[in-house]
Amino acid sequence: MKYLPLLLANLTRRKVRTILTVGSFAVALFLFGLLYTIRASFNQGIEAAGADRLVVINKVSLIQPLPLAYRDRIQRTPGIKEVTYANWFGGVYQDEKNFFAQFAVDHSTWRAMYPEFLLSEKEWSDFSASRTACIAGEFTAKRFGWKVGDRIPVRGVIYPGAWEFDLVGIYKGARPQDDTSQFWFRWDYLQENGPPWTKGYVGWYVARMNAGEDMAALASKLDESFANSTWETRTQSEQFFMASFVKQMGNIEFLMVTIGSVVFFTLLLVTGNSMAMSVRERTGELAVLKAVGFTDTFVLGLVMTESLLIAVVGGGLGILAAKAFTVFGGDPTGGLLPVFYLSMVGIVSGLVATVLVGVAAGLLPALSARRLQVVQAFRRL
Amino acid sequence: MALPLVYNIESVRTRWRTTIVAVLGIAGSVGVFIAMLALAFGFKAALVSSGSKDNAMIRRAGATSEMDSVVTLEDVRALEDAQEVARGSSGPLVSPEMVVVANLPLKATGTDANVQVRGVSPRALEVHRGVKLIEGEFFKPSMFQLVVGKYAVKTYAGMGLGRTLRFGGSDWTIVGVMDTGGSAFDSEIWCDSNLLAPVYQRPLNIFQSATVRLTSESALGPLQDRAKGDPRLQVQVERETAYYEKASSMLTNLILGLGTLVATIMGVGAVFAALNTMYAAVAERSREIATIRALGFSETAVIVAFLFEALLIAAAGGVIGCIGALPLNGITTGTMNFQTFSHMSFAFRVTPGLLGFGMIFALLMGVLGGLPPAWRASRLPITVALRDL
Amino acid sequence: MVKIGSNGSSSSLVVARDVSKTYHRGSEDLHVLQGINLQIDAGDFVAFMGPSGSGKTTLLNLLGGLDVPSTGSIIVAGDEITRLSGPRLTQWRARHVGFIFQMYNLLPVLSAFRNVELPLLLTSLSSDERRKRVETALRVVNLQERMNHKPGELSGGQQQRVAIARAIVADPTFLLCDEPTGDLDRKSADEILELLELLVRDFKKTVLMVTHDPRAAERAHATLHLDKGLLTQ
C-alpha cells in the first residue's frame, strides 16, 4: 500500500483527537458487546432449550405439584420417547443471597434427557450409587469453591430441615450457552426425608418426543388426557416454557435496543464531527493533492479510508475488550446471570455495525472533500 | 481577574454546531443513567410501599419468603389477643393470608405469566391501609369472587370488572378493582383464602403469613419478644416494610448493577466526546487565547474560562438528558421478581433527587472532559500562537 | 531619543543590554537576536525594519515581556522585567504594555465595547469607571457609534482602530505594534498611522512599531534596522 504513509500522516497529525475518536469507538462497541451478552444471558434458557423436549406442569400453577402416577401415563402416550421429572428444592446455602437452582431429580432418567450436561461415567455411577449424592454445575462449584468429595449443607425451606449432600460430580455444559449453575440431588432421597404431604408428588415432568412428531398436537393430547382431574396439566415445548419466563422479565430487550440506538447515534455524531473537523483543517493540503494531480475520487477514498481505519481499530478493540470482560470478568451480578458469554454472532454483528458507522461517519466529510475546488481552497488560505 | 462570563457564553453559542455533539453525548449518558436508576428505584419503591410501618408480618421462623412459610390458625389465635395488636370494630386487626402463583396469560404477548394470588380474610381492607377500591366492591366471604389490582387489569388478559376467570376448576367473577398506590398489591389478585386453599390442595386453617396492625410503630419490639417467649410459636415477627425491602433486594441490585455499568461506560464515551470538542475549541482559538494572555490574563484565568465552558456544555447536556428521562416517570413496566416467583408491574420513578444525581453526573463529565483541554489552553506558548496564521 | 548602545542613562524609558535570543530546533541553534543594546526615551516613536526572519517581532516580544531573552537584561520604566517570574511578568504586562497586532486579534464573540474593556477587567475599577474609560478610548479612535458591533461586522480598518482603543484604554507605559498596517489597504493604513501619530503627539505615548512599509516608517521619529539579528541605525 504505497499510500499508507500519507494515510498514517493524516491520522497522526492530531494524535490526541485520533486517539479520542478511536477510544469513542472502542467504548461504544464495548457497550454493544456487553448489551448483546446481557440480552443473550436473559434469553439463555430459550437458546439452550431442547428442540424436542416438552415440559408438563400443573395447570393451575407452577408451584403446584403433579402425582408420580402420571409418569407411566405420560411414558405410554404415543409419540413420547422418554420421561423424567424433578422437584424444585429452593433451599438456602449459607446465605439467602447465594441463590442457585436446586433440583431433586430422578437419577435413572435425568442423564438421558439432558445430554448437553457432561459428566464422566464414574460421576454418573456414583450418583446412582449413593442416596445422599449430589451433582453441581461448574459455575456454582467454582463460585463456592466446591470439590468432589465435599459435604454440602443446604437449609431446606420448602422442605424444612438441615439437609446435607455429598458432592460426587461437577458437570460442564457441551455448549457455551448451557447453564452450569444447577445443583441436583436424588428425588428418592427427598421423598424419604421430606414432610409427609410431599410424598408421591413431583414438581414437573420433562418428556422427549419421538422425531418427526407434531409437538403442538402432542402437547394438546397430553393435556386432554389429564383434563377434568384433580391435577390438570399444562404441556408446552421447553422453548415456549423458557420464553414465558423471559417475556415476564418484560421490556429488558426493548431497554437494551433503546440504549444501543442511543449509543450508536451519539457515536455517529462524535466520529462524523471529528472527521469533518479534520477535513476542514486540511483544506489546503487536500487542495494541494488535487493540484498535483490526484483525482476527486482519490481524495474521497482517502477520507473514507481514514474513517474506516479509525472505526475498525476502535471497534475491534471494543469488541475484544467485551469478549475479555465476559471471559475473565464474568457475570457482573454475582450469580444471577450464570451464562455470560459473547457468541461469534455477537462479535461479527459488532464488527459489521462498526464498519457501517465508520462508513456513515466518513461519508459527508468525504463527499465535501471530493467536491473541494482547488482555486477556492487556495483563496480560503 | 476573570474573563467575562459573556465571553464563554458567546463562544459556546457561536460554536454550537461543534459543541452539540458533546452536549448530546452527555445528554444521552445522563438520560440512560436516570432511566436505569428510575427503573431500579421504581421497583424498590413499589415493593416497599406495599408495607406499612405500623404493620407486622408474621411468618414461620426460618422462612425466606412468604411462599415457603407456614402459619397455622393456632399461631394466629395465640397472637391475636396480644396487647400490641390493634383492634377494629370487628375484632383484632389480623389478616391471615396465603399466597400462591397462578398461570395467566399476559395481555401483551399471550404467553403465560406467574400471577400472585393472595387469599385473604374479609378483614384485609382494615389491616392493609392504603388499599382503596376504585371500582366495584370487595369480595363477599365464601363467594367465588376476585378483587384485582389496577396493574393486574392492564397486564393480564381478561381482567375487567364483571369478567369471569376460570382457574382451579372453578369460575371466579371479578367484582372489584383496587388501587394500592403503585405497590406490589396492584399486581395481585385477592380472594377468600377459604376458597383458595382447596384449589391448591391446602388444608383449611393453614396460611402462609399473617399481617397484623400494631397499636403503634414501637409496639413491634414487644410483640417480637412475646412471640419468642411463647413456646407454642415458631414464628418470626417482622415489620412489613422491612420484609418488602428484603424481598426486592435481589432484583433491585441486578438492575442497579447492570444499569450503573452501562451508564458508566456511556459516561466514558461522553467524556471522550467532550474532550474532542474542547480540544478542537482550544486549537481553533489558539490565537484568541494567546491574545488574552498577552493582554495580561493569567494562566488560571484561562483554565477557569475553558473549564466554565465545558461545564456550560455539560450542564446543557444534563438538562436535556433530564428532560428526556422525565416522561418516563410513571410509565409502568413489569418484570418477574424471582424472589417471589411472580410477575409484578411497577412504575419508573423519576424523583428530583435522581435528577439532581443526573446533573451531578453531567457536571462530573464536564470537568473530566474540560480540564485537560483547559490545561493545554493555559500552557499555549503565547508568541508561537500569535504568529500562527 | 533613541540610541543604539546603552550607557545606563536612567532617563530612558526602555533599556536593553546585551540582549540575545537563540532557539533550539532539534540539533540546530537559531540565533535570532545577537547582542542587542538599545535605549528608548518616553514619547519616542520608533520603527523597526528589516527583512523577513531578521528578528523584528522577536525583539518586540522581548521588550513587551511576551518572551524572555536567552541572555541580557531589559529594563522598562525602572523595572528589570528579565528578572520577573511568569505570573509577575504577566501582571507587569497588563499594566505597562499595549499590543497592536497585524491581524487585530480581537475576540470575535465579543462586541467592540467588550473587547476594549478586556484589559480593564484586570484592574479593580468599578463597572461605571470602566465604561467611562472605554467610551473615551473609542472616542479617541473615532468609533463610539460602532461600539456594540462585533468584529465580524466591522471593516479591517475599523477593527484595527478597536484594537488600538483596547491597547490604550488602560493607559499603558508604551505601545508595541507588530505590522499594524500589514493587512490594510492604503487608505485605512494611512488612517491608522495618523492615529498613532496623534497618540504620540497629543497624548505623549511611546510607540514601538515593527513594519515592512517604508511609508509607515516615515511617520516615526527614528527607524532602526535589524539584519540577521543585529541592530543598525
Image: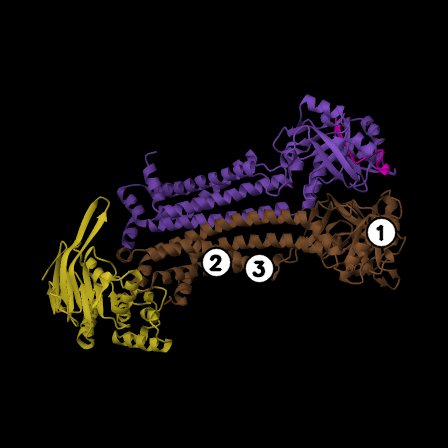
Chain colours: A purple, B brown, C yellow
Q: Which mark is residue B230?
A: 1
Chain containing mark 3? B
Q: Quadrant of residue C133?
A: bottom left
Q: From which residue to which does the magenta span run?
A: A195-210
Q: Nearer the viewer, residue C87 or B88?
A: C87
User: Looking at numbered disc 3 in the image, what kind of residue is underneath it?
Assistant: Leu
Task: Return the residue at label 3.
Answer: B355
Q: Nearer the viewer, mark 2 or mark 1?
A: 1
Is A206 part of what is drawn in magenta? yes
Give the position of the C terminus of chain A as an image quadrant: bottom left
User: Looking at numbered disc 1 in the image, what kind of residue is underneath it?
Assistant: Asp
Q: Position of residue C226 (x, y in %)?
A: 13, 58
Chain containing mark 1? B
Is B206 part of what is drawn in magenta? no
Task: Return the residue at label 2.
Answer: B314
Crowding near the residue tagged with mark 1, few <14, some 14–19, many ≥20 C-alpha atoms within 10 Å: few
